[in-house]
Amino acid sequence: MITFENRIRYEYKIKTAKVDTLVNSILTHRDPKSQEAKDASRFLDILITEIDRFYEEHSDLLSKKGKLPHPRSRLPENKEWNANAEKYYEKNPRKRPRK
């Protein structure tokens, strides 16, 4: 049975994957000034605010499992989150993401 912690981590992973996919499609769009691209950018803003809210609600759990806010996030950098993630990677050096 899946635990609550894993459920939150998987949901955050899915949300960030959606943002990455949308960003990639916007950047590779053949006509970046079209209405379709503008609407996709607005939708991207909505997705980013949603994932920011999700991260704020579950920040303790996510940061203790090594997850930091998405690079496109508008959340201010938090020393506690960075410290929690760094502690996690010190204990689990193989799980550190590539830069």
Image (cartoon, grey):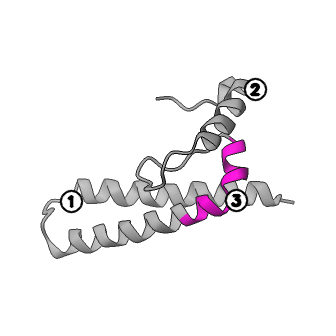
Task: From the viewer's perspective, tell me whether residue 13 is left or right of residue 90.
Answer: left
Q: Give x and y (percent) for residue 10.
A: 66, 56
Label 3, on which residue? 8
Q: In the rendered image, which residue does mark 2 sit on?
A: 91
Helix, strand or loop status at disc 1: loop
Q: Amino acid at mark 3?
A: Ile
Residue nearest the observer in this picture, 51 or 83: 83
Q: Is 26 left or right of 56, judged from the image as shown?
A: left
Q: Position of residue 37 (x, y in %)?
A: 22, 68
Q: Nearer the viewer, mark 1 or mark 3?
A: 3
Give the mark, 1 or 3, whose residue is nearer the N terminus: 3
Residue at (65%, 40%) from the top-left corner?
A: 66
Local packing at callout 1 (Cα closer than 10 Å; few below 14, some 14-19, many 20+) is few
**Of pointers 2 and 1, the one earlier in the residue sequence:** 1
- Within the magenta stretch, is there residue 75? no
**Tag 1 residue:** 29
Residues marked 2 and 1 touching at CB (< 8 Å): no
The residue at the point 46 percent across, 67 percent down is: 49
**Residues shaded magenta:** 53-65
Using the numbered discs, state the Cα–Cα distance from disc 1 to disc 3 in whole angstroms: 32 Å
Alpha-carbon neighbours of circle 3 within 10 Å: few (<14), some, or many (≥20)? Answer: some
Q: CA distance from mark 3 to mark 2?
A: 21 Å
